[in-house]
Amino acid sequence: MPALPESFEGTALAIDLHMHSTASDGALAPSELVTLCHAKGLSHIALTDHDSLEGVAEADLRARELGLSVLPASELSCQWRGLNIHVVGLLPSGPGAMLEAGLAEQAIAREKRAETIARRLERIGLSDGLAKARAWAGSDRPLNRPDFAHVMVAEGLVADLSGAFSKYLGNGKIGDVKSHWPYLSEVVEWILDSGGVAVLAHPLRYKLTRRKRGLLLDEFCRAGGQAAELVSGFQNPDVTRDLARQLMERDLYGSLGSDFHFPGGHLAPGSMSPIPRTAVAPVWAHPRLAAWFASAASTDVAGPGAINESVDDDTPRALGPEDQSPEGESPEDKSPEDKSPEDKNAAHSV
């Protein structure tokens, strides 16, 4: 397996550090996701299920069979100034005791929230919603809003997932239950205690002005955060370049991820907007991750070539039928400054 380059500029990359499986709200089992990643030509991936590491062992087993490298990771929910913020923990040594305890607390919080969502949705005609959402999930994992959205579509209450969120589950709607997530600084501490790297997930998708996004990045840095997702799925190239400047100003590393959830939509594993010309250091160069990636480079991998790329111009990659938006998103969760024709995905609502 070839080593990853030391910079983002002018190189094709076979990496995706933000994807989901059935261990949270993805559609594919961890092993199926890894198989798809192999078919897409990826060599380095991270499984980042919401507040869970349950799928990592299965993913790693399949990855070893195919010659891929799976970095243990999780996308952790937290709060900042009343907003729901996500932080990806990249965990080369796995979870520490503090993170394991935190994940247990998160699972309880998600179950309590699901019960409240079900009670509220009874008012709009969804009977026995908790049991139906559990049946849809097909496992005992914590339930998320997309699970209820799928049930609402099946029951004929809405035409599609987008309608479920725009009418009932999106921000400020009846099914939008604000859990008592830990503060941003707490989840960063869990990750650091585990020897991992804390990555601010999709910073362009929190409906923030540039100034407020800077304030979020500042507090994230003060808490010990080390990186942010420079590219997450498809996003406005001008705003991506501006985000790169904000990361450079704070000496933050840059990460990449599709935020893939299910096949058949606008996103596929490894598919994302082109990376702008930037001197932002890639997250795999971080001292806490460099050894893991160096070890991964010694593993042979067979399969197609890389599918995402760095480019010097402003032309976004054309969308293909294999691309998709994460399921269950609420369009209103997106900042107007970040919307563009090629930006087909918004912050995933969970």
Image (tube, rainbow, N blue to C red):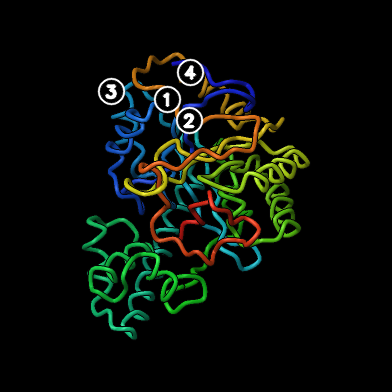
Earlier sequence position, callout 3 versus callout 1: 1
| Rendered position, 301 above or below 143 | above
The answer for how far apart the CA atoms under marks 2 and 3 are is 18 Å
Q: Residue at x 43, y 16 (%)?
A: 1
Residue of label 1: 43
Residue of label 4: 295
The mark closer to the camera, 4 or 1, is 1
- Identify the element where label 4 is drawn: helix
Residue of label 3: 65
Image marks 2 and 1: residues in contact by CB distance under 8 Å: yes
Q: x and y percent of residue 252 in the render?
A: 69, 39
- Left or right: 278 in relation to 102: right
- Identify the element where label 3 is drawn: helix
In this rendering, the count of numbered labels is: 4
As shown in the figure, which amino acid type bears the numbered disc 3?
Glu
As shown in the figure, which amino acid type bears the numbered disc 1?
Ser
Earlier sequence position, callout 4 versus callout 3: 3
Earlier sequence position, callout 4 versus callout 1: 1
Does any portion of residue 192 appear in the rendered image? no
Task: Work out whether residue 209 or residue 176 is closer to the camera in this orientation and state it.
Answer: 209
Task: Work out whether residue 86 or residue 156 is closer to the camera in this orientation and state it.
Answer: 156
The answer for how far apart the CA atoms under marks 4 and 1 are is 13 Å
Binning the other alpha carbons within 10 Å of mark 2 as few (below 14), some (14 to 19) or many (20 upward) gives: many
Image marks 2 and 3: residues in contact by CB distance under 8 Å: no
Earlier sequence position, callout 2 versus callout 1: 2
- Left or right: 266 in relation to 220: left
The mark closer to the camera, 3 or 1, is 1
